[in-house]
Image: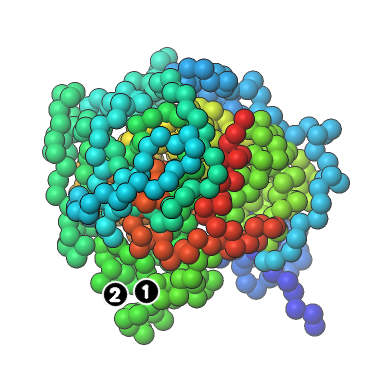
């Protein structure tokens, strides 16, 4: 008897279980379909894997296909609150949608998202894809400024110590400082709604003109922490509703071995940003790439593990609060057996065996989006994303919503239907891990970054899945434009419909991070609130990301360690937190060497023609792609 092939993330019987779960989350009444499925012996969705076992009989698979079609026709109660088309999103955001920088060519979003049409999208035009499957101020003296590329005007700051560094300087804020810690109810809209965190609508300042850097970054191989932070503007933690303008110094950080939650208490000063609105330099891009890789690599060995397992494994080696790479050395055998490391990452992502950056979709997609901009420019269409994938991305390196959309493309289904047809993963995290480049493309312009991310995301995602990408792109664009981490997060929220589940979850997460010095407490409350979602869903992961960045105040080590220590999609959250914090740092030499040296300036990837590429070269290619 021939053994049956079980391809993950596309089997109808597995998609059906996930779609029933999705229906319970988006408010559709799927009682009848669930009863039919369970009465016929249909299994629930696999809790953590991509396919159930054993495979079902043919009749059950046929029933799954029928029920998937029925579920797609059910009324969508949240459709008005959680639209997918860009014009409807901007309308839902109202006057919180950020104003473009003066002189921007992207003053308004397109009237309709430029999806493919029948004449523009032809599968026959795509070539066959290749196959594969806590932190004191720095005490060291400033380094001599290395050679910088032509047009670069700011020398790098001193290198951080191993635990990171604080930054100095008080750049002009790009966004208005926050008022009191007031958070409006998202239950009903207002004619002129407040900003996403209860503040005035965000506006951007004019960009200063600057020459673009050219060539490779010179003398920049490892990163550290960023160098600028504006004066504290948030209210004291003990009095969250204090009068506007009240300030307080940040509380003392816990020691690495202290009793506080992962990473210690959160400072409130709001570090980050280079204080300028200029196109990203190669150094900034390099720091963001390195940050993304380090954060991803930190989270890889514990991906798919439950939160108690992550905490137990780290505590067993004295690494809690989480402060460095995970290691198997010193883990008791019975604990290791009960909570095995991620099987694909155990051999290349622990402290004892890291040798460069191993392949991960959290790095593949940003690389693909650099190629997207090189090939099609910033005005790319959703169909262009599809054609690039078919040309450059092996199908076996796609997962969840991306794999379903890939299958739909090969079946002749065109965007944006590729995101909807038999795709129960359309509100998961996949679009968010592709969004960094869209923020890098538009420093200081979160609206344009979000619109660009929307065109990418709608190939594979809808509603909250799309919002997660827009949130990340808006946050990164603000950070690249000089905002600190808190203003950056507000910018990210400004492009998300305020009544959506994702916006509500992110606002609550930020409040929790401001209210508690123990990050474990923050995480526990997030899991209590959002534990009913799948661990890859966009809503809980966006909330955790926002909480981690807020609590760490933009510090690099604190950001990635908090993001990973919170569980759920550990490598993706670590990657995005590292990208934001690396960009806030602004230069590779501002990131702790202990995070970047193991990367060895080498990325493994199955994106055709780029295996082994260096992060310095990725930064150079990113800069080339950003040129008009």
Figure check: 116 above or below 64: above
Figure check: 428 above or below 237: below
Q: Residue at x 74, y 74 (%)?
A: 4
Q: Residue at x 39, y 72 (%)?
A: 351
User: Looking at the picture, how far across and down is residue 582, in whole percent?
Assistant: 40, 47
Q: Residue at x 48, y 48 (%)?
A: 217
Q: In terms of depth relative to the viewer, which is nearer, 589 or 369?
A: 589
**From where the camera sits, is residue 42 visible?**
no
Figure check: 120 above or below 91: below
The answer to whether the residue labelled 2 contacts the one labelled 1, judged by CB atoms less than 8 Å apart, is yes
Determine crowd level at label 2: few under 14, some 14-19, many 20+ residues with C-alpha closer than 10 A.
Answer: some
Circle 1: element type: loop
What is the number of the mark on residue 327? 1
Q: Quadrant of the C terminus?
A: top right
Q: In terms of depth relative to the viewer, which is nearer, 302 or 155?
A: 155
What is the number of the mark on residue 317? 2
């Amino acid at each position: 008897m021939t053994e049956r092939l079980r391809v993950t993330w596309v089997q109808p019987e597995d998609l059906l279980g996930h779609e029933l779960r999705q229906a319970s989350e988006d408010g559709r009444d799927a009682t009848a379909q669930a009863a039919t499925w369970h009465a016929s012996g249909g299994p629930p969705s696999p809790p953590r894997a991509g396919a159930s076992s054993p495979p079902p009989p043919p009749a059950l698979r046929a029933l799954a296909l029928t029920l998937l079609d029925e579920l797609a026709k059910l009324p969508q109660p949240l459709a008005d609150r959680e639209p997918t088309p860009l014009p409807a999103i901007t309308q839902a955001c109202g006057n919180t949608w950020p104003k473009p920088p003066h002189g921007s060519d992207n003053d308004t979003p397109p009237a309709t998202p430029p999806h493919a049409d029948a004449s523009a999208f032809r599968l026959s035009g795509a070539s066959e894809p290749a196959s594969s499957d806590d932190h004191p101020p720095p005490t060291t003296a400033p380094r001599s400024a290395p050679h910088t590329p032509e047009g670069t005007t700011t020398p790098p700051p001193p290198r951080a110590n191993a635990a990171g560094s604080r930054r100095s300087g008080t750049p002009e804020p790009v966004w208005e400082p926050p008022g009191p810690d007031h958070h409006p109810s998202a239950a009903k809209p207002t004619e002129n709604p407040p900003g996403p965190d209860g503040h005035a609508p965000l506006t951007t300042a004019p960009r200063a003109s600057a020459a673009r850097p050219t060539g490779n970054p010179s003398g920049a191989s490892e990163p550290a922490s960023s160098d600028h932070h504006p004066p504290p503007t948030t209210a004291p933690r003990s009095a969250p509703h204090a009068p506007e303008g009240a300030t307080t110094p940040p509380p003392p950080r816990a020691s690495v071995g202290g009793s506080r939650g992962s990473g210690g208490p959160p400072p409130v000063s709001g570090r980050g940003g280079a204080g300028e609105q200029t196109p990203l330099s190669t150094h900034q891009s390099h720091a963001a790439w390195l940050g993304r890789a380090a954060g991803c690599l930190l989270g890889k060995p514990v991906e798919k593990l439950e939160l108690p397992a992550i905490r137990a494994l780290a505590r067993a080696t004295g690494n809690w609060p989480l402060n460095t790479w995970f290691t198997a050395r010193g883990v008791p055998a019975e604990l290791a057996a009960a909570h095995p490391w991620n099987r694909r990452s155990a051999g290349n992502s622990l402290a004892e065996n890291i040798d460069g950056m191993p392949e991960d979709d959290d790095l593949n997609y940003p690389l693909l989006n650099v190629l997207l901009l090189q090939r099609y420019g910033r005005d790319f269409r959703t169909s262009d994303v599809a054609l690039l994938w078919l040309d450059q991305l092996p199908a076996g390196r796609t997962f969840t919503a991306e794999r379903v959309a890939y299958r739909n493309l090969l079946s002749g289904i065109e965007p944006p239907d590729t995101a909807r047809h038999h795709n129960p993963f359309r509100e998961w995290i996949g679009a968010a891990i592709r969004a960094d480049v869209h923020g890098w493309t538009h420093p200081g312009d979160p609206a344009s970054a979000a619109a660009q991310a929307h065109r990418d995301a709608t190939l594979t995602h809808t509603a909250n899945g799309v919002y997660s990408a827009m949130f990340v792109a808006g946050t990164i664009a603000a950070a690249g434009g000089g905002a600190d981490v808190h203003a950056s997060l507000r910018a990210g929220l400004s492009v998300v419909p305020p009544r959506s589940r994702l916006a509500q979850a992110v606002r609550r997460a930020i409040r929790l991070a401001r209210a508690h010095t123990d990050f474990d407490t923050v995480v526990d409350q997030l899991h209590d609130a959002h534990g009913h979602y799948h661990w890859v869903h966009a809503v809980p992961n966006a909330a955790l990301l926002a909480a981690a960045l807020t609590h760490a105040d933009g510090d690099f080590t604190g950001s990635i360690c908090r993001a990973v220590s919170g569980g759920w999609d550990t490598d993706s959250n670590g990657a995005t937190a590292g990208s934001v914090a690396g960009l806030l740092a602004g230069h590779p030499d501002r990131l702790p060497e202990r995070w970047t040296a193991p990367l060895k300036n080498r990325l493994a990837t199955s994106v055709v023609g780029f295996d082994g590429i260096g992060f310095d070269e990725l930064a150079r290619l990113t800069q080339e792609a950003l040129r008009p």
